[in-house]
């Protein structure tokens, strides 16, 4: 999806898109950086939008990995369907339904581009609680945001939360890496 197409869709659905521009290559690289490529992974992607992060994940990870993308925007769901990779499953459902599709402790990584700042607290808590449930004990939750306002909330659900930053995005972004800290 071209930047202009993303912008038009973002303007139509700003509350669920949360951005006016697709993630920059620098942000995408930092977000998917922690994903290892030496073993098969089970990955959930939340809010993949136009698929720029999805493609980066698929390009980086082991050939036997699986990626399940949760996207509620119909236009983005159609665009994601154009990614021809048998490892990718696109679900046109809300991120609040992780445990409908994954058993506890079965997921290696949850990679999220959800606009947390635009999601009500109850829904955010549901999503984070479900992410916590489906992650393996050594699993990680990766999230980017444009502000640090949900840092405390992430600390409520994950024992270890680290933050990095990139100026090379519109707007500049924070990248959270969260783990349960059990191992």
Image (cartoon, rainbow, N blue to C red):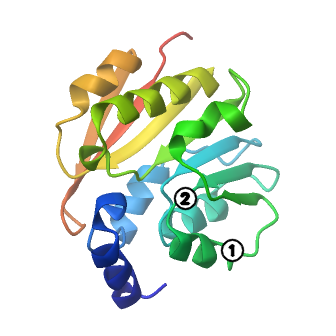
Rate crowding at label 2 as few (under 14), some (14 to 19) or many (20 or more) other CA atoms within 10 Å. Answer: many
Name which of mark 1 and mark 2 comes first in the sequence: 2
**Placement of the C terminus among the 4 image quadrants:** top right
- Decide which of 157, 78 is in the foreground and name it: 78
Q: Residue 119, image x and y in percent?
A: 31, 44
Which residue in the structure is indicated by mark 2? 71
Of 172 and 8, nearer the camera is 8
Give above or below for 182 relative to 32: above
Instruction: Identify the element where label 2 is drawn.
Output: loop
Image height check: is 155 above or below 87?
above
Distance in Å between CA atoms under marks 1 and 2? 11 Å
**Quick one: SS at disc 1?**
loop
Q: Quadrant of residue 171?
A: bottom left
- Residue position for label 1: 81
Q: Position of residue 52 (x, y in %)?
A: 49, 70
Left/right placement of residue 72 relative to residue 98 reads left
**Viewer-closest of 54 and 183:** 54
Coordinates of residue 63 in the picture (x, y in percent)? 79, 56
- Residue 21 in sight from this viewpoint: no
Mark 1 packing: few (<14 Cα in 10 Å), some, or many (20+)?
few
Q: Are marks 1 and 2 in contact (CB under 8 Å)?
A: no
Residue 172, placed above or below residue 133? below
82 sits to left or right of 162: right
The residue nearer to you, when weighing 80 against 109, is 80
Which image quadrant is residue 155 in?
A: top left
């Amino acid at each position: 999806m071209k930047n202009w197409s993303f912008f038009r869709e973002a303007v139509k659905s700003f509350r669920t898109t949360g951005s006016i521009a697709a993630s920059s290559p620098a942000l995408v690289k930092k977000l998917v950086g922690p994903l290892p490529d030496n073993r098969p992974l089970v990955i959930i992607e939340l809010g993949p939008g136009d698929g720029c992060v999805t493609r980066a994940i698929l390009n980086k990870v082991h050939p036997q990995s699986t990626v399940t993308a949760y996207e509620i925007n119909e236009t983005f769901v159609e665009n994601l369907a154009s990614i021809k990779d048998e490892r990718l499953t696109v679900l046109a459902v809300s991120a609040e339904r992780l445990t409908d599709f994954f058993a506890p402790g079965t997921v290696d990584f949850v990679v999220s581009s959800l606009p947390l700042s635009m999601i009500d607290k109850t829904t955010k808590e549901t999503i984070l609680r479900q992410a916590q449930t489906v992650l393996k004990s050594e699993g990680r939750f990766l999230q980017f945001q444009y502000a640090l306002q949900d840092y405390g909330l992430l600390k409520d659900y994950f024992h270890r939360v680290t933050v990095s930053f990139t100026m090379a995005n519109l707007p500049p972004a924070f990248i959270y890496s969260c783990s349960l800290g059990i191992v």
